[in-house]
Amino acid sequence: MRRIERAFVTLNGAILVLGLAAMSVIVGWNVAGRYLTGNSLTWADEVARYSMIWLTFLGSGLALRHGAHAAITNAQDALPGRGQRILRLAILLVLFAFFGFMVWVGWDYMQRMRFQRTPATRISFAYIYAAMPVGFALLIVHLLFVARSYVETLSFRELEGDGAQAAKE
């Protein structure tokens, strides 16, 4: 199971790195072209915008597993150990329900937008809005991987060789 989790996290991170690199090259090329030649790519701003949307949704699962999303823990900290675990379990169940709901809402919205086209690239908006159900599905998978350690110890289990773990040593 750890091998599957490690491969999943590595693949998710690699896709983010490649996407960010591609977006940086496109934006950089467009800026250079605009100032050096007076011409710019008509589609660059649109591709950069939609890439940022996709990168946000694809990266949210990795942020979740590292505890990087905003959290308010005052109520939890005031509870005894067993109460904290019960509250974390309730939070986990609410998150699973919310993420599942958002996959459904995102899928529905994606289906509604499939006939509209983007202005510059003329691709279906369904491909843009697919980021929402895909991103929330990834959040569910990441949450499944860290759920047990979150409920038991309020920690997000680090993988061996993970950058955060290596930084601690």
Image: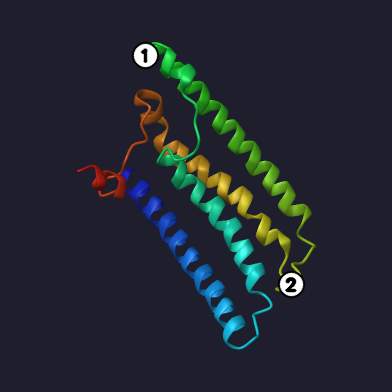
Residue identified by numbered label 1: 81
Q: Quadrant of the C terminus?
A: top left
Q: Position of residue 107 (x, y in %)?
A: 68, 48
Q: Amino acid type of disc 2?
A: Arg
Determine the image quadrant of residue 50.
bottom right
Q: Position of residue 78 (x, y in %)?
A: 43, 13
| Label 2 packing within 10 angstroms: few (<14), some (14-19), many (20+) | few
Front-lying residue, 158 or 140: 158
Residue identified by numbered label 2: 122
Q: CA distance from mark 1 to mark 2?
A: 55 Å
Q: Position of residue 31 (x, y in %)?
A: 57, 76
Q: Position of residue 58 (x, y in %)?
A: 52, 53
Question: Is residue 5 shown left or right of residue 16?
Answer: left
Colour pattern: rainbow
Which element carries disc 2, helix, strand or loop?
A: loop
Residue drawn at point x = 41 percent, y = 25 percent: 151
Which element carries disc 1, helix, strand or loop?
A: helix
Identify whether 114 is placed above or below 37. above
Question: Is residue 122 shown left or right of residue 100?
Answer: right
Identify whether 150 is placed above or below 32. above
Identify whether 97 is placed above or below 49. above
Q: Which mark is residue 64?
A: none
Q: Amino acid type of disc 1?
A: Gly
Decide: marks 1, 2 in contact (CB < 8 A)?
no
Q: How many marks?
A: 2
Residue drawn at point x = 74 percent, y = 72 percent: 122
